[in-house]
Image (cartoon, grey):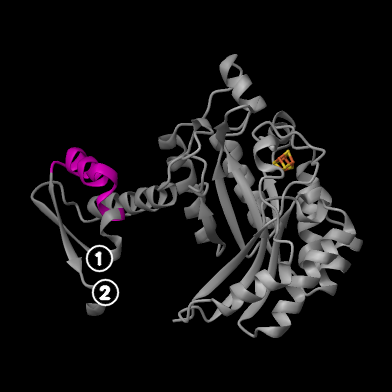
Amino acid sequence: MDKHASIPVFVPHYACPHGCVFCDQKKISGVQRPPEDLEEYLSSAAEGLDKKFTSADIAFFGGSFTGIEEPLMRHYLAAAAAVRKKYPKITGIRLSTRPDFINGHILDVLGEYGVTTIELGAQSMDDTVLLASERGHTAKDTETAAKMIKSRGFSLVLQTMTGLPGDSREKDVYTARKIAELAPEAVRIYPCVVLKGTKLEKAMISGGYTPQSVEEAVEICADLIDFYEKNGIKVIRAGLHSSDLAKNGSVAAGAFHPAFGEMCQSELIYRKLREKIIKNGVFSGVFCIAAKESDVSKTVGQKRKNIRRLEDEFDIKIKIAYIKESER
Ligand code: SF4
């Protein structure tokens, strides 16, 4: 099976002029910088790629890449393009940015260096949510940028958030519908996490903002994953990377859980099993579920949550039959 890898390059948020309420610029700016000799770093990463990976992307992440000054942006892109030329396994260059940092000239520059994928931080398609989150751009900006990106032949990935100030389940569903209309190749869904020292934390302390719980976020994100998948849009991530967020104690509240993505998958499995039980009219006795070894923990749920819910609701006994991957 073809396996694809990512070679990450962290780009700091050089003096971002914005002040999104959930962002702590002090923590994210200037902490890490791309290595001095980026080309050498990328070459050695390409050479060190595990044999199981048949292809890889160079991925600039961590900021609004196209917001950095053009000479520096070109310097980073030139290093990535040179390494891509040398190593056939490197098949793409991807980056993430803000919708209002996209225009015709920027796309010309990205095209010059062979950028393949652009990720846009849309966050919400509801202008009241964007305003309350102090994003500094509108839903229309996202629409315009997404259309330009696609018309120039780049792959488009859209990032959205749930649980922002002024947000609701209805608005998240509305956002998902608007995002699907833009036909991205994939999406990432990040439930809002309250970081210490942010405006959002202040709002929470003063009672002006109620953070989403992990449970609420799992329910909403499971709805969204289901929606995107039914519309042929891949969900490449649900939930923040556990990275250092939990370790360095920067999370004050909100929907942060290191296994968030798996919890959403588990919720979707629970919904499917529930439907099956109802469809088959199994309201007593034993209900046997066959699950691949790799899916067993998602099927059972955290602390056997799925099994408990189904057994309580239907007064049945659930039995799991393990299927070895090789038997499939
Ligand atoms: S655009 Fe918002 S989230 Fe990104 S660095 Fe600036 S303030 Fe932070």
Residue hosting label 1: 293
- The N terminus sits in image quarter: bottom left
Image position of 326 with respect to 219: above or below: below
- The residue under the point 45% across, 48% down is 222
The image position of residue 241, as x and y in percent, is 51, 50
Q: Main secondary structure of the magenta part?
A: helix
- Disc 2 CB within 8 Å of nearest ligand 1 atom: no
Rendering quadrant holding ligand 1? top right
Give the distance between the C-alpha atoms of the residues marked 2 and 1, in whole angstroms.
7 Å
- Using the image as rendered, state which of residue 281 and residue 317 is in the foreground: 317
The image position of residue 263, as x and y in percent, is 38, 48
- Would residue 124 be seen by someone viewing this image from the given angle? no
Q: Is residue 300 magenta?
A: yes
- Mark 2–mark 1 contact, CB under 8 Å? yes
**Of pointers 2 and 1, the one earlier in the residue sequence:** 1
Residue at the extreme right: 105
- Would residue 146 be seen by someone viewing this image from the given angle? yes
Left or right: residue 49 versus residue 272 is right
- Quadrant housing residue 213: top left
- The magenta stretch is 298-315
The image position of residue 110, as x and y in percent, is 82, 67
- The residue under the point 25% across, 59% down is 296
Name the mark on residue 276.
none
Image position of 259 with respect to 43: above or below: above
